[in-house]
């Protein structure tokens, strides 16, 4: 279709044939006709210049009398609408239809200045507010590597806004955390964020590419503007200075049109103005000069067909589902209508342009409807973000007093933050206020959280001092050789460590490592010492085992003193063999059984034998925990109480039989009382003996 629309070259015409078909007055000579035409142009332009003369002077180097404002009766409607200069005059009331056309004209002017801008339509505009900072940097890296830097300009700037908003919010939070953890510091806050450095590097690369592009474009635009203004001047001279040689004029026109096509881009603020000048003089070429009617009609017909095809295509575009795609093609059709296709006959010129403008308005309305749906979505996003902010504000008022509860609160805030960033854009007029409310809500929550952790930090500081003291104590005891006394202290230190709460994280690992090494060092030494003791104890066990076999064959000689001395000698010998391992203590029981049997055989009093067995039993406790002696003492004291109670009961019972003589029951009770009193004396002797032994052990320990 573009090839058909661009095929607007004027057919070659013979100069004489053209002159024959001109509608001229019979009395006018060609010279007079040429003069009148030139005068008509100058006079008509002068009449229409008054309203726009000042603007024309500021916009173009063309003299006042050559202002490009079209003639009222000869200018096509589209020229009036597209001309930014005329639209700015007080008398030009811009309708919605004109506004739609002007919007397209402005975009085309921008893209004509820099053709690389057209590529921006091929890159989808993302909702950058929904991306994380890392995703934004990755997206920026892709955009910077696009060949035409200006095609990504809008994308990069939108991306940059989103990244900087998120970055400033992130830094604000880190600053609040820093001051909360270091309330008394005079150090300036600094946070090293590699992702920001990467972003800055990529954005600097983009900015350098853009600046280089502008530099290379600037001189070309200025040069091309001068070329086009010269072509306008040349075209005007062709119209004004024609001497009736139509063929020569057409040849000059075709040459000018060809050079116009290849003149290159010009500044966008000059685009519509320069084009209007050019088109105005092009129409004058056909309308003011009396050209060959047949050639003119062929040209008008050809241009009409192309413009009708454009109108038909726009009607098809109204049914296109992709409105943005259809609108971009409409822009291209406007560019072709304006730049590539010449004028049509005056009798259809206004009607044709009006229809094209009306279709443009319909497409513009569809696009506005789409934009309205986006605005509606932004309004919905605003409502969602306001709900998120309200939840954050509520969390900023809820005071909790436990670390785990704060962990839960922090998780809720993080989820709300992510939801806020993922929600998307809000209307531009409330964007700053919404963002400020969000930051304020998060900052209030952080202040509440930080106040709690300040208290925690004070407690942790106290805990740190206590644990440091335990570390020093453990280090002082780790090389102690007094295993019996030190072991209990080391266990007490470990138990106390467990009761102390958390310390600041930056000290926690190092402090625990020191404490653990000190404790492990001591208990490793204790373990090694027990290995040595176990070897000695096993040797004592083996000796006692052999001695036990030897004792089994021992026989009493019948002499009480000799046998008692022999038994005592065996007891001393057994004690001299040493301590046996704990799990081999059963051998002590076997030895005591043999002693019991020997004492039974021994013709000694029961009390003496029992005391000897008791002494032997206590000797077996030597070197053991003092708790066994204490337990034995408690047992004896209970037995004394029991025997005393029994004696008291028997003596009380015998009172009922005082008047009875030779009563066998009374005699038996009396014997029982005597036996219990002897037993009581034995238990008291045992108590004296064990008290003396306990006292001796304490004195030895001191």
Image (cartoon, rainbow, N blue to C red):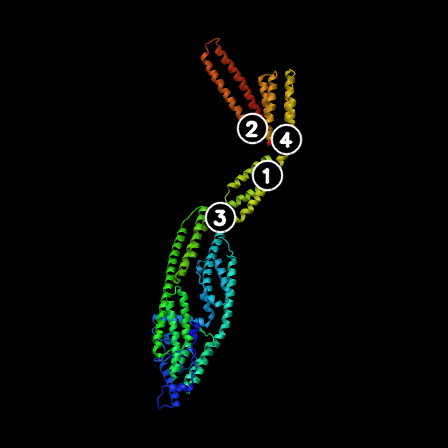
Determine contact: label 1, label 4, CB under 8 Å: no
Q: Which mark is residue 538?
A: 4
Q: Residues within 10 Å of mark 3 (few under 14, many from 20)?
A: some
Q: Residues within 10 Å of mark 1 (few under 14, many from 20)?
A: some
Determine contact: label 2, label 3, CB under 8 Å: no
Q: Which mark is residue 429?
A: none
Mark 4–mark 2 Cα distance, whole angstroms, equals: 22 Å
Query: Which mark is first along the chain, 3 or 4?
Result: 3
Mark 3–mark 1 Cα distance, whole angstroms, equals: 33 Å
Query: Which mark is first along the chain, 3 or 2?
Result: 3
Mark 2–mark 3 Cα distance, whole angstroms, equals: 48 Å
Q: Is residue 407 left or right of residue 607?
A: left
What is the residue that sits farthest to the top in this orientation? Answer: 662
Mark 2–mark 1 Cα distance, whole angstroms, equals: 25 Å
Nearest to viewer (mark 3 / mark 1): 1
Determine contact: label 2, label 1, CB under 8 Å: no
What residue appears at the point 53 percent right and 17 percent down from the top-left corner?
677
Nearest to viewer (mark 1 / mark 4): 4
State the residue position of label 3.
457
- Secondary structure state at the residue bearing disc 2: helix
- Secondary structure state at the residue bearing disc 1: helix
State the residue position of label 2.
628
């Amino acid at each position: 279709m573009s090839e058909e629309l661009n095929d607007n070259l004027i057919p070659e015409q013979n100069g004489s044939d053209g002159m024959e078909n001109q509608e001229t007055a019979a009395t006018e000579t060609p010279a007079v006709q040429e003069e009148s035409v030139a005068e008509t142009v100058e006079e008509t332009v002068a009449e229409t210049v008054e309203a726009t003369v000042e603007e024309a002077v500021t916009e173009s180097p063309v003299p006042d009398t050559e202002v490009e404002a079209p003639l009222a009766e000869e200018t096509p409607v589209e020229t009036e609408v597209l001309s930014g200069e005329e639209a700015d005059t007080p008398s030009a009331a811009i309708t919605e239809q004109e506004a739609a056309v002007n919007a397209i004209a402005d975009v085309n002017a921008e893209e004509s200045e820099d053709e690389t801008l057209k590529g921006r339509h091929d890159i989808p505009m993302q909702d950058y507010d929904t991306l994380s900072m890392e995703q934004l940097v990755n997206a920026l890296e892709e955009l910077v590597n696009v060949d035409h830097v200006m095609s990504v300009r809008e994308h990069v700037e939108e991306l940059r806004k989103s990244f900087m908003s998120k970055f400033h919010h992130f830094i604000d939070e880190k600053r609040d955390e820093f001051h909360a953890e270091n309330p008394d510091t005079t150090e300036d806050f600094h946070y090293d964020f590699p992702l920001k450095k990467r972003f800055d590097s990529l954005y600097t690369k983009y900015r350098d590419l853009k600046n280089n592009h502008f530099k290379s474009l600037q001189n070309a635009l200025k040069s091309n503007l001068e070329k086009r203004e010269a072509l306008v001047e040349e075209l005007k001279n062709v119209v004004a200075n024609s001497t009736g040689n139509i063929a020569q004029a057409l040849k000059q026109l075709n040459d000018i049109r060809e050079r116009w096509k290849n003149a290159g881009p010009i500044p966008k603020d000059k685009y519509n103005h320069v084009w209007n000048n050019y088109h105005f003089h092009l129409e004058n070429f056909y309308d003011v000069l009396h050209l060959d009617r047949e050639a003119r009609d062929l040209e008008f017909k050809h241009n009409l067909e192309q413009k009708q095809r454009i109108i038909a295509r726009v009607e098809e575009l109204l049914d296109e589902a992709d409105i943005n795609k259809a609108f971009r093609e409409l822009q291209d059709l406007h560019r072709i209508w304006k730049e590539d296709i010449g004028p049509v006959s005056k009798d259809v010129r206004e009607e044709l342009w009006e229809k094209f403008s009306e279709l443009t308005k319909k497409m513009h309305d569809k696009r506005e409807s789409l934009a309205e749906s986006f605005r509606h979505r932004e309004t919905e996003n605003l409502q969602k973000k306001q709900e998120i902010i309200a939840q954050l504000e509520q969390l900023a008022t809820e005071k909790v007093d436990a670390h785990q509860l704060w962990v839960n609160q922090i998780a809720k805030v993080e989820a709300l933050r992510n939801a806020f960033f993922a929600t998307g854009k809000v209307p531009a007029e409330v964007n700053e206020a919404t963002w400020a409310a969000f930051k304020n809500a998060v900052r209030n929550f952080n202040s509440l959280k930080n106040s709690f952790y300040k208290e925690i930090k004070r407690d942790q500081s106290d805990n740190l001092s206590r644990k440091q003291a335990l570390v020093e104590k453990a280090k002082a005891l780790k090389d102690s050789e007094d295993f019996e006394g030190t072991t209990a202290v080391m266990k007490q230190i470990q138990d106390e460590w467990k009761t102390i709460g958390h310390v600041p994280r930056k000290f926690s690992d190092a402090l625990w490592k020191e404490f653990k090494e000190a404790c492990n060092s001591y208990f490793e030494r204790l373990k090694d010492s027990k290995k040595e003791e176990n070897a000695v104890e096993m040797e004592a066990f083996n000796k006692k085992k052999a001695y036990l076999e030897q004792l089994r064959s021992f026989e009493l000689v019948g002499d009480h003193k000799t046998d008692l001395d022999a038994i005592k000698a065996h007891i001393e010998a057994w004690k001299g063999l040493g301590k046996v391992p704990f799990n081999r203590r059963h051998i002590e029981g076997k030895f005591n059984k043999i002693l019991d049997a020997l004492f039974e055989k021994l013709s000694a009093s029961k009390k003496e034998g029992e005391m000897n067995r008791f002494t032997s039993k206590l000797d077996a406790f030597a070197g053991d925990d003092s708790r066994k002696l204490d337990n034995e003492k408690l047992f004896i004291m209970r037995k004394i109480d029991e025997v005393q109670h029994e004696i008291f009961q028997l003596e009380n019972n015998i009172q009922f039989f005082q008047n009875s003589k030779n009563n066998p029951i009374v005699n038996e009770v009396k014997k029982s009382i005597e036996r219990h009193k002897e037993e009581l004396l034995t238990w008291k002797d045992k108590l004296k003996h064990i008290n003396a032994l306990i006292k001796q052990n304490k004195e030895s320990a001191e």
